[in-house]
Image (cartoon, rainbow, N blue to C red):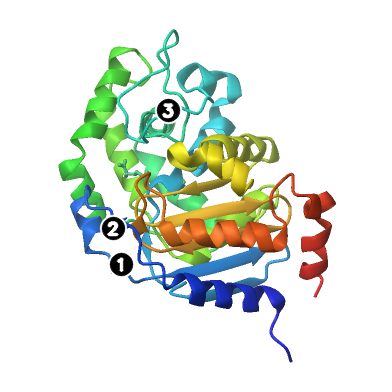
Amino acid sequence: MQEHMLQQLIDSLHKQYSKNEEGEVATYIPELGKADPDLFGICLATKDGRIFETGDSDQRFTIQSISKPFTYGMALEVLGQEKVSRHVGVEPSGDAFNSIELESGTNRPYNPMVNAGAITVSSLLYNHYGDEALEIMLERFSAAAGRRLSVDEEVYKSEARTGHRNRAIAHLLLNFGMVFENIEPALDLYFKQCSILVNCRDLAIMSATLSNLGKNPVTGEDVYDISCVKDMLSIMLTCGMYDYSGQWAYRVGIPAKSGVSGGVMASVNRQLGLASYSPKLDARGNSCRGIDVCVSLANELGLHAFDCMNIGSSYLKTILEQ
Ligand code: GLU
């Protein structure tokens, strides 16, 4: 039987972009600097639960900032949009992910995809759930991935030991009353959420869970409330790719999130979750090969939300019916 067109496509992109040697592995969290720069995996998960994968799609790495939309969704579910928006905004910041800056006037972090916003969300979750927060988070992330996930202790300890900038951000937030007094355990929760281990397949399924309106397409489990998924995807589209988000919306046009360990996850509305892993990052902190893969997939399959080939997602629908 002939291989599915999506398998052929990702195999060929993997071959093509393995040659891209650009970028540097992140080292500001010392443990991340140990990653093998040649690793490269791609995975697609469809809304009917099929998986297409190639390269190092089994390789585990820490989720880092890709955790941020998922914790934001959890906060929206338990606290509601109004309460969450008193603590964190929805505007792209135009600054680096770890900038020590808050929105003028409100003193809120700009959005939940930059560190200030994500630390605020972790503080909201810690305040709500207390010491159970990490376990509840792990359960939720695991349900989205369809298998039990865990924390990489070495990466967690490495970031907890060296995360002075994030501590500075947390104390600035405390100064403005955006986070709660018990900031140390909330920061600890943030460091642990960033150190949750995933592989490309996990991320593709987590992403497909969002594309599939909150239901994991492999296990059939309802993981996220449909109303929160809309907010999670909107923030990913406007703020998910660091200060490349504007260009990303222009060129790729799919809600996405990347992380400093080299993962990129993107959600094609009601169709597909895609993920790639390759640790070498560009100057903005996005995986070089990950960007290549997403730009090519968007072009080849007409995935951009406003692509003329994507009218009613009919082109992709035809491919998925194969
Ligand atoms: N744990 C990382 C940090 O806070 C996450 C950054 C990222 O992936 O963008 O610095």
Q: Which residue is mark 2?
A: 25
Work out how far the residue at label 2 is from the one at label 3, CA to CA, in angstroms. 31 Å
> Mark 3, residues whose alpha carbon is within 10 Å: few (<14), some, or many (≥20)?
many
Which disc number belongs to residue 37? Answer: 1
Relative to the observer, which residue lies in front, 224 or 110? 110
Going 50% across and 28% down the picture, which residue do you hit?
A: 92
Quadrant assignment for ligand 1: top left
Mark 1 or mark 2: name the one nearer the start of the chain.
Answer: 2
Q: Which residue is mark 3?
A: 124
Point out the residue furthest to the bottom here.
1
**Amino acid, disc 2:** Val
> Mark 1, residues whose alpha carbon is within 10 Å: few (<14), some, or many (≥20)?
some
**Residue 10 placement (x, y as % from top left):** 58, 72
Q: Nearer the viewer, mark 2 or mark 3?
A: 2
> Vertically, is 249 above or below 104?
below
Q: Is mark 3 within 8 Å of ligand 1?
A: no
Q: Is residue 214 left or right of residue 140?
A: right
Any part of residue 74 in sight: no
**Amino acid, disc 3:** Leu
Mark 2 or mark 3: name the one nearer the start of the chain.
Answer: 2
